[in-house]
Image: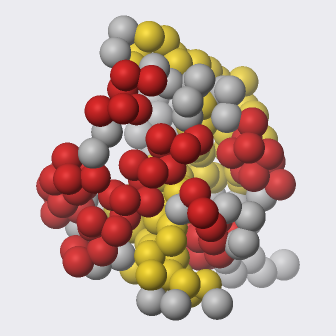
Amino acid sequence: MIRVRPMQEEDICDVSTVRVKGWQTAYPGMVPQDYLDTLTVAEDARMRRDMFARSRGSVLNLVAEEDGVVVGWAALGLSKEEDRKPQDGELLALYAAPDCLGIGVGKALMQQTLVAARERSFRRLVLWVIAANTRARRFYERGGFVLDGRSADWSVNGTAVPEVRYCKDLEPQNLRV
């Protein structure tokens, strides 16, 4: 059974493992291979530990566990977009371990992230995804996210990696009619 809970500092290495293996499995052909080949769990954990300490209170990090093992991670924060409104949130990350794809890890993380977004009074969520990542795009579309027409190139080792933006309007949690 998949359980979602707030991430703790002791989860950082496990989250970095999920993230690095996820990138190396999902992004060949989308992101320069030399970049993927140089990703390490140790370096990612170092960066993540710093980000985790700096973002306490401003970013909600969630982990998904199965039988006590971290198999997924999601991060939710305020939107960083230029066109943001005060109540816009951003799904900053959502990863499932490659060997756990299709078993509900992403869905469980998404459900809990949406609950948390509503609790934070976000009215809209945005997220960016690599344009060529059709599996992730289908996942977000099934979850009610829609393309909003924004795109950008992310530079990876001098190579432009096209990304597209999705958004999802959230209903107020306690809407009374």
| Rendered view: 64 above or below 52 | below
- Horizontal and vertical percent for residue 169? 72, 53
Across and down, in percent, residue 50 comes to 15, 55
Q: Quadrant for residue 135, please give it.
A: top right
78 or 76: nearer the eye? 76
**Is residue 87 rendered to the left or right of residue 61?**
right
Closest to the observer: 147 or 118? 147
Residue at image point 40% right, 79% down: 6
Would you identify the image quadrant in which residue 132 lies? top right
| Residue displayed at 72% across by 31% down | 148
Of residues 158 and 36, the one drawn nearer to the viewer in this rendering: 36
In this rendered view, identify the residue nearer to me: 111 or 123.
111
Q: Position of residue 76 (x, y in %)?
A: 46, 59
Against 173, is 21 above or below? Answer: above
Q: What residue is at 20 percent from the left and 47 percent from the top?
A: 43
Q: Relative to residue 90, is residue 20 drawn left or right?
A: left
Q: Quadrant of residue 147?
A: top right
Placement of 146 over or under 103, stated as above or below:
above
**Residue visible at 44% across and 76% down in the picture:** 70
Residue 122 visible within the image:
no
| Horizontal side, residue 65 vs residue 54: left or right | right
Quadrant the C terminus occupies: bottom right
Q: Is residue 55 visible?
A: yes
Position above or below: 136 against 113: above
